[in-house]
Image (spheres, rainbow, N blue to C red):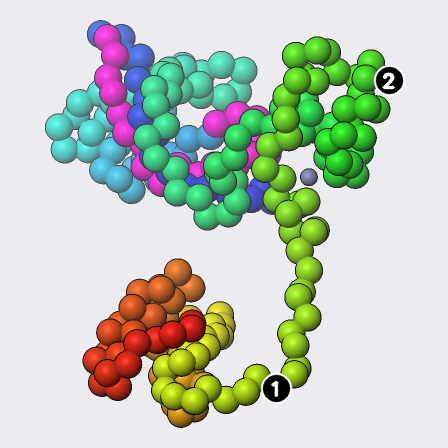
Amino acid sequence: MVQATGIGTIIMEMHLPDGTLRCTLTSVLYVPTLKKNLFSIPKATQSGTVVSIDSTQCVIQNLHTGQLLAVAKHSRGLYMLQGTSVIIQQATPTAQAFTASSTPTSMDLLHQRFGYIGIRCLKAMAISNHLLNKQDLSQELQFCAECSQGKQFCLKVSRSKVPRPLKRLQLVTSDVCGPFSLSLSGARYFCTFNDSHSKRTVVAILKHKGEVFDKFKVFEATTTKEIRLPIEVF
Ligand SMILES: [Zn+2]
């Protein structure tokens, strides 16, 4: 069994006896493990074409107009579609197959292969063992997700008591909770704004974590208008 990791649209220039014809193939599956591209006849007939096959070739025509769309010549037990792909118009990734990333440089690869070693040691090692040429050595490391994740740590939260502010909105704290399973409105997070003096808490529902600042602006506008005091520390 092979696994498709993406689905998209491909434009093909079909080579016909009297010239070429541009065709758009939709719902094309991207299967990285397949070495050859395969064309599905049932899919073609489902999308309004008629396929006729004889011992020398396979011809695909428009079911209604009879227009010739593609020809596949018989060769060594396979019908080879006569055409070339022009542009990959769009590919919707269903997995991480198409995640955009810049091409790793030789320096990046060496950094990964030697257990994410730091740039200074990496350069020293590369020089003493003649692993990289001058041009590669002049490169800096690109952003490395593994290193940045590996170096993250939790800051200790102080348990000492903070004196209660003397007036409202002197200190407002906030927290974000989630992700939770999707709500009916499509929300996955909620955030709270707590006034440390009155202990009054306002809850806002979020679809994405990035909405916190927008929700804060709404909270600030409504509470400062209601209480007639500015937020001093957030
Ligand atoms: Zn790294």
> In this view of the protein, can residue 55 be seen by the observer?
no
Can residue 227 be spotted in the picture? yes
Along the line of sight, the residue nearer the viewer: 218 or 1: 218
Image quarter where the C terminus lies is bottom left
- Residue 178: % across, % down: 49, 72
Q: Which residue is mark 2?
A: 128
**Numbered mark located on residue 161 in the image:** 1
- Residue 88 locus on image (x, y percent): 37, 28
Which kind of residue does numbered mark 1 sit on? Lys
Q: CA distance from mark 2 to mark 1?
A: 55 Å
Residue in the foreground of this view, choosing between 137 and 187 = 137
Quarter where residue 141 is shown: top right
Task: Say if the magenta span includes residue 55.
Answer: no
Residue at left 54%, top 15%? Answer: 76
Report if residue 36 lies within the magenta region.
yes
Tell me where residue 143 appears, x and y as whole percent: 59, 37
Amino acid type, residue under disc 2 in the picture: Ser
**Range shown magenta:** 19-37
User: Can you tell which of label 2 and label 1 is closer to the viewer?
Assistant: 1
In the image, residue 62 above or below residue 22: below
Q: In terms of image quadrants, where is residue 230?
A: bottom left
